[in-house]
Image (spheres, rainbow, N blue to C red):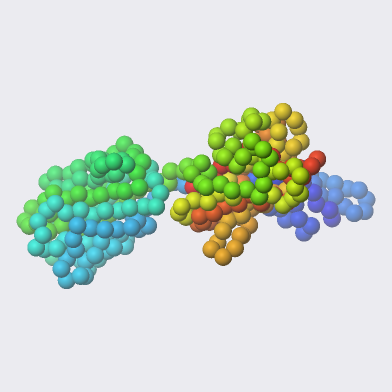
Amino acid sequence: MLWSTSNPSVVQAHPNGTITAMGVGTAVVTVSTAEGGKTDSVAVEVLPPPEPGSQNIAPIAALSASSSHENGSHPPQKAVDGIRDQDPSRWITDTTTAAPHWLLLEWDRDYEIDRVLVWSGFNGLVGRQIADFEIQYWDGSGWQMAASVTNNPQDGRIGQYNELTFPAVTTSKVRMYITRGSAYDQIARLFEIEVWGKPVTMNIAPLAALSASSVNGAYTPDKAVDGIKNQSASRWMSDPALAEPHWLQLEWDRAYTIGRVNIWSGFPDWVGSQLADFEIQYWDGSGWQTAVSVTGNTQDVYYGQYNELYFPAVMTDKLRLYITRGSDSDSIARLCEIEVWF
């Protein structure tokens, strides 16, 4: 049995009959017999992965607090451990410190957040839920209020909690700011906080420091991250006197979690000059690893096409486009644009 694919940049067909999705699009997979000339074909559509839904992101936050109980047994981490009804599993402020108190949650990326749940109080005594507080978010220059509660009646002792919804905000920091500990004392007692949101994606290629194996005159690497995808003057091109391999490297001042790269390649004014064979590689701390590869690329910028490449997310501060075949007609690498999505 012989297996083939009409579009290897979307689907690759293997000799054992299995197929591998390489990018978003449609391809026709064909099987034929070595004898008798019988064939059969099926169209395969590769869809982008679904957008991640809203989830409780409190457990993945870096935590800090204005204070913690002086006996050391009630740190902020107890407020994001998923236990909502046990006294040992609470964040409690220093009993000698007056309000305001605060608990800060900080992430390594922006999230779109629109809901916070709060369980507070003390199983041993009624009415020790946090009395007055705000849910605040950082807008880049200061703290803004998303929701507030005064004279809170929701007592965690009897399973009650505050479910606070508000217009979605984009932020990497949320703070629970407490202006009155409880109706009876100054202590803040928090069983659990949940912060519900979904990640905000962004193209981080323009933030990277760029380098390349070679350059053709004015066709410098910065032209491949300027947002212009369909103009011949705005491309990185390798030196036409040099053979493959070619590479373009992107390096950031911190690590990012990356799971998607988009590639526009070729010559907007001439058909068939797209990059033919290449890999997206990431640095794992000791060497380059392949995240995804494309062979026999058919996505030509001349037709407005591009490679939308998804792969299991990796955390790295360096990414490389490693090109082993410039195009079907010559050895030159022509890259109109690369996007790296965080």
Residue depicted at x 34% and y 38%: 168
Q: Nearer the viewer, residue 172 or 49?
A: 172
Residue found farthest to the left: 184
Residue 282 position, x and y percent, is 58, 56
Residue 225 vs residue 40, the one in the foreground: 225
Q: In the image shown, does 218 or 88 lie closer to the viewer? A: 218
Residue 253 spot, x, y in % from top left: 46, 52
Task: Identify the residue at the far right of this view.
Answer: 36
Q: Say whether residue 318 is left or right of residue 11.
A: left
Residue 206 visible: yes
Task: Report whether 183 appears left or right of 144.
Answer: left
Residue 149 x, y percent position in the rendering: 17, 44
Q: Residue at horizontal 76%, vertical 32%?
A: 271
Which is nearer the eye, 67 or 41? 67
Q: Is residue 27 something that shows in the picture?
A: no
Residue 156, placed above or below residue 263: below
Q: Which residue is drawn at 69% across and 49% down?
A: 246
What's the residue at 80%, 46% (across, down)? Answer: 30
From the top left corner, tell me how far across and down residue 115 is, in percent. 31, 45
